[in-house]
Amino acid sequence: MRTWFLALLPALAACGTASPPETTATSPGAAPTAGAPRAADSSALPPPDTARAKAVSALGDTLRVVRQRHNFSHSEGPADAFRLVFRGPSVLKGTAEFTITDPSGQVIFREVLTEPDLEAALVYEMKTPTATPAEREAYVLRRIDQFFQPAQFQKPAVGPQATFPSNVENLDQATWADLKRRPGTIGFDYLKGKEDRQRIAWSPLKKQTVRVR
């Protein structure tokens, strides 16, 4: 009898001590183990609410940015920052903001150039009476990319043999004469429109950027 009872003990022990179920840690989004029931994924993101999407202003879209550093407000020392930012819904409907910022962070020149200002000179390169939209876009982007070429920076800003340009608005004789006496001044030339070639320079007398041509 004792022998039979001792032989029954392992079977009774096996019935009374069940092993816990084996678990596998899974990262969020991992596929469930084959054969296991799929649990509800309470952490799943809700579908996007397109009705509440913020409207984007096309006029604020930046299409091109060109930067260059060059001495301007001073002939030596830290350079000024030249920047042209072209924004708009498309290349043919954009507007460019041209700024010059001195080494201290002060904006010393700002001008807005329209798309026609940048495109007008295309007429001199056209082989046919009209240009395609793709040709016009390519020309405008090329104008932007080449806006700050080294040859456009001139020293001095006003040459010793130059004559006073009476057609330049807001330029007075005293400012012109002062620049003419300063061989270290630097001028920047750029084309606006079809034939309006302008030159600007920093006037130490007036402490501001002035147009000298």
Image: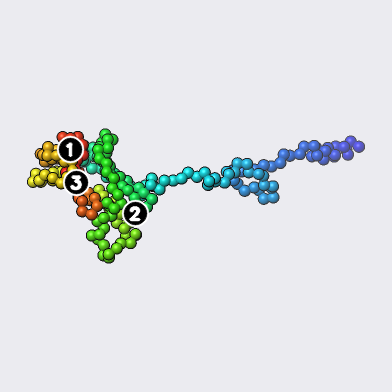
Which of marks 3 and 2 precedes in the sequence?
2
Dot 3 and dot 1 residues touching (CB under 8 Å): no
Residue beneath the point at 26% across and 58% down:
122
On the image, the x and y values in percent for residue 4 come to 88, 39
Q: Secondary structure at mark 2?
A: helix
Which is more toward the observer, 105 or 10?
105
Which is more toward the observer, 164 or 151?
164
Residue beneath the point at 33% across and 62% down:
132
On the image, the x and y values in percent for residue 19 come to 73, 39
Residue at mark 3: 199
Gap between marks 3 and 1 measured at Cα: 13 Å
| Number of residues whose C-alpha sits closer than 10 Å to that of mark 2, classed few (under 14), some (14–19) or many (20 or more) | some
Dot 2 and dot 3 residues touching (CB under 8 Å): no
Task: Name the residue at the bottom extreme.
Answer: 128
Between label 2 and label 3, give the one nearer the viewer: 2
Residue 120 in view here? yes
Q: Quadrant of residue 70?
A: top left
Q: Quadrant of residue 212?
A: top left
Residue 203's label in the rendered image is: 1
On the image, the x and y values in percent for residue 30 come to 60, 46
- Left or right? Give the position of 138 relative to 159: right
- Assign the N terminus to one quadrant of the image: top right
Gap between marks 2 and 1 measured at Cα: 35 Å
Residue at mark 2: 92
Between label 2 and label 1, give the one nearer the viewer: 2
On the image, the x and y values in percent for residue 11 come to 82, 40
Q: Secondary structure at mark 3?
A: strand
Amino acid type at image mark 2: Leu
Residue 67 in view here? no
